[in-house]
Image (tube, grey):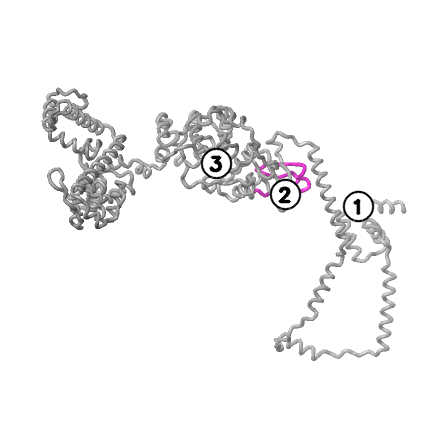
Amino acid sequence: MTHKYSAADISLVLGVSKRTVQIKAKKEGWPFTLVNANGGKTASYSIEDLPPEIAQKVNKYFAVKVIPQTSAAIKGSAAGRHISEVEQNHKKVQLKVRQDSLKNLAGMQGEKLQRALSKVQIIEAVKEFQARTKLPKIKSVDEFCRLFNENVISLNEEVYSVCKSLSRATYLRWEKTYNTQGVTALAGNYGKAKGSGIIDSNLEIKEFCLALIQEYPHITGQRIHELLQAQFNSKYPIPSASTCRHWLKTWKNENSSLYMSMFDPSAYNNKRMTAFGSMSANIIRINQLWEFDSTPADTMLTDGRFSIVGVLDVFTRRVKLILKPTSNAEGIALLIREALIDWGKPEIARTDNGADYLSAHITTVWNSLDIINDITNPYSGWEKPFIERFFRTFSHGIAELVKGYIGHNVSDREKISARLTFAERLMEKREKGAQKVALDVQLSSTEFQAFIDQWVDSHYHHTEHSELGCTPFEKLTEQKQTISFIEDERILDVLLAPVPSQKGFRTISKEGISVDGGYYIHANLGEYVGERVFCRHNPNDIGKIYVFHALHGHFICEAINPEIADNDITIEHAQEARKLQRSKLAIQRKAFKSLAKTHDVSDAAQKYLDFRTEQTKGLTAFPKPSKDFTNDVISTAQDALKNKPTVPEYSQEQINVFEARRKELEIIEGINTTTSVYKNDHHKARCLTIQKRDASITNLDKAWLHKYRNANPNAAKMLDKSFSAQSTNQK
């Protein structure tokens, strides 16, 4: 069967006017057949004769199967069948349109909906009136319009408020629209057609205005008018300032989400970004996911404005917070260490991509402990919504009641300042360039940290959570789950911060380890006196430091500062330290002595010289070209040598006599210089003193005795006193 469609049918499929289809058919020469229709004949187009792309759309729209054209089918087609097919297809089109219109009615509201429904009531009332009076259609319509205009027809007041009067032409137009286009078409299209304004109708002007909004979201209609004048004054008619203002307002209303995403991304994320479902739907156990984040505290403290670094266990909603001057790797590492010790090991740690969260030693901890670090995208706070919501709960709750509250934003800060008197505001600005702070600042960072901990432990963990349906404490205790803890706390020492200055390195002295003017001690430090160590500390517990060997890296002890830790140094501490020190030295000395016995190194220097001699004995330098050097001094010396008197020559017999005499003199000198063996320096000094009194001594002995008396004045006095007494007795 060959299916045929009118220009009106095709226009519905293509979404254009009937006239547009007729012009296109005539221009492209579509084959057609004239068939009888209301008011005369109209062109009917066979599906096989339509362009392929249009035929495909028509088939898809009406769900009609294309049957290949054959000569027998063409010859057997009768004019009556053509008319029947066209009418049937026309009815299908009208039914399809009315059904689509009915679906669109659900989204219609306000005056449009009221107009459409009122006109439908009038159409149905006319049909009922015609069936009841049994008048011809035109006469029944005329009579109904007369009665309607006289308010005789019983209809709702809303119908009369929408339609003040009714004529035959108006009714017939409504009826045709209702049958061909559906109920929504009865709402009408009042007002200016969309896109027909002076800005929307000119693509270049419209794109220029949109570019201005993109670059300057705060731009006004007046500025757009002025910039359009500068850009297109001689090219296009320029819309007035009021037109620009109206267009800008309309565009913002129609594109509110787009405009908000450009003008205020944070507000868009909070108000417009889709947030269907729950981010915690797949979190089914404790420590499955931790979220980390940092935020500046909205409270000014006596030592400045601090940041709050927090971690939240998504399943139980437990939180842990620490206060730091800035959100840095040191504070985050300390928070991780405390959470790992108190809560156990998480499976996933979700952080943002800030440098403080991606530092090398924190990344090493994640990898070493088999913890997955889930890094969110930049500027995507909604990817860790639970810790963000907690910070809002805290900052917009009890934090607003703390002394020193400075507001969440500039507007809040100005309102707080406005509450101060003029004199107080002058005092607030007393330091030029200093940051303004509330005048009632009373809390220090230590006190505020204690306040935060108390609020979390006593209030938040024991207050019902709207999403959990119970308190975080109850959620934790009701779970019968094995939690993985890190048994050896030393593994987590890498998360502690190095002590201030010298990059954490210290040399152990006799008094202990010096940090910030105080000394930290432990008995185990006794055996490392004089050695280099590396020290870490917990800023929240400054009375203790963790000591590691600087060279070997092993843990030594937890040294304490007795003055800070309120722990007195007893004699037992010192004795234990000395005992360990002596024990270590004894072991080391014994090891050295054992090595000395094993290896004879007494003649190490001579062995080395012999080794070097053996290495270099075969080396001889090639002779270099040379020449005699002479000057006046050398010439004079050479002349003197030439004039030197000759030395008499001795016979061998005379030389033998000289040698025998020399030996005799040596024997005599040896007898005269033979001395007794001294026991020590004091014995020698006593002997020399006696010799000096009885006989003369050599100059060398005199010098030694003089040096001894200077070095030992008490011994010299005793010698003088002793020999003085002996001289008196002899007399």
Residue 715 image point, x, y percent = 79, 46
- Left or right side of 700 for 261: left
Q: Quadrant of the N terminus?
A: top left
Mark 1 → mark 2, Cα distance in angstroms: 54 Å
Name the residue located 14 percent from the left edge and 44 percent from the top edge.
34
**Nearer-the-camera pick, 665 or 202:** 202
The 10 Å Cα crowd at callout 3, few under 14, some 14 to 19, many 20 or more, is many
- Please state which amino acid type lies under the numbered disc 3: Phe
The answer, for residue 203, to whether it is visible in the render is yes
Q: Which mark is residue 663?
A: none
Question: Label 1 belongs to which residue?
Answer: 715
**Nearer-the-camera pick, 355 or 135:** 135
Q: Earlier in the sequence, mark 2 or mark 3?
A: 3
The 10 Å Cα crowd at callout 2, few under 14, some 14 to 19, many 20 or more, is few
Question: Label 2 belongs to which residue?
Answer: 554
- Please state which amino acid type lies under the numbered disc 1: Ala
Residue 337 image point, x, y percent = 55, 36
Q: Earlier in the sequence, mark 1 or mark 2?
A: 2
Mark 3 → mark 1, Cα distance in angstroms: 79 Å
- Left or right side of 274 for 205: left
Chain part drawn in magenta: 504-530
Where disc 1 sits, the SS reads helix
Q: Which mark is residue 292?
A: 3
The answer, for residue 161, to whether it is visible in the render is no
- Left or right side of 446 for 638: right
Circles 3 and 1, Cβ within 8 Å, touching? The answer is no
Residue 609 image point, x, y percent = 71, 63
